[in-house]
Amino acid sequence: MSDGFSRWARTVVSRMRGKGRDAGAGFVEYAGLLIIIAGIFTLVDSLGLDNLISTAILNAVTDVIGGG
């Protein structure tokens, strides 16, 4: 059991400190972020909130810049 744990620990450490430790991780994280953003846009569009959100942003900007 101790030998198996030692081998596992060496494998984990080598993968954490090795040359290709994060190979491909950036792409997977980027793809996941794009899927989440696309889901949010789809949800906003399907619920009809796009006009409501646009109006709220326009009102907030108008309040900040002092327009009437």
Image (cartoon, rainbow, N blue to C red):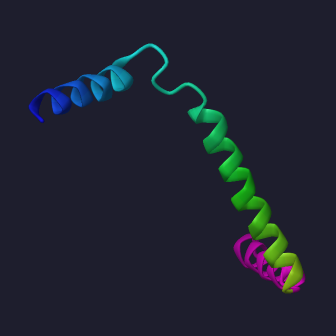
- Residue 15 in view of the camera: yes
On whether residue 26 falls in the magenta region, the answer is no
Apparent side of residue 20 relative to residue 68 in the rendered image (left or right): left
Q: Residue 55: x percent and y percent?
A: 85, 82
Q: Say which of 23 and 10 sits in front.
A: 10
Quarter of the image containing the C terminus?
bottom right
* Quadrant of the rendering where the N terminus is positioned: top left
Q: Give whichever of 26, 41 is nearer the camera.
A: 26
Q: Position of residue 28 (x, y in %)?
A: 64, 41
Horizontally, residue 6 falls left or right of residue 18, namely left
Residue 7 horizontal/vertical position (percent): 23, 25
State the extent of the magenta-drawn residues as a range: 48-68
Which residue is painted at 60% across and 34% down in the image?
Answer: 26
The quadrant holding residue 63 is bottom right
Magenta stretch: includes residue 62: yes
Main SS of the magenta segment?
helix
Name above or below for residue 65 compared with residue 29: below
Can the viewer see residue 54 in this picture? no
Q: Residue furthest front?
A: 1
In the image: residue 43, left or right of residue 29: right
Q: Residue at x 49, y 18 (%)?
A: 20
When the figure is inspected, residue 65 is found, relative to residue 7, above or below; the finding is below
Residue at 81% in and 68% down: 41
Q: Residue 29 placed where, x, y %?
A: 61, 43
Examine the rendered structure and indicate whether residue 34 appears above or below residue 19.
below
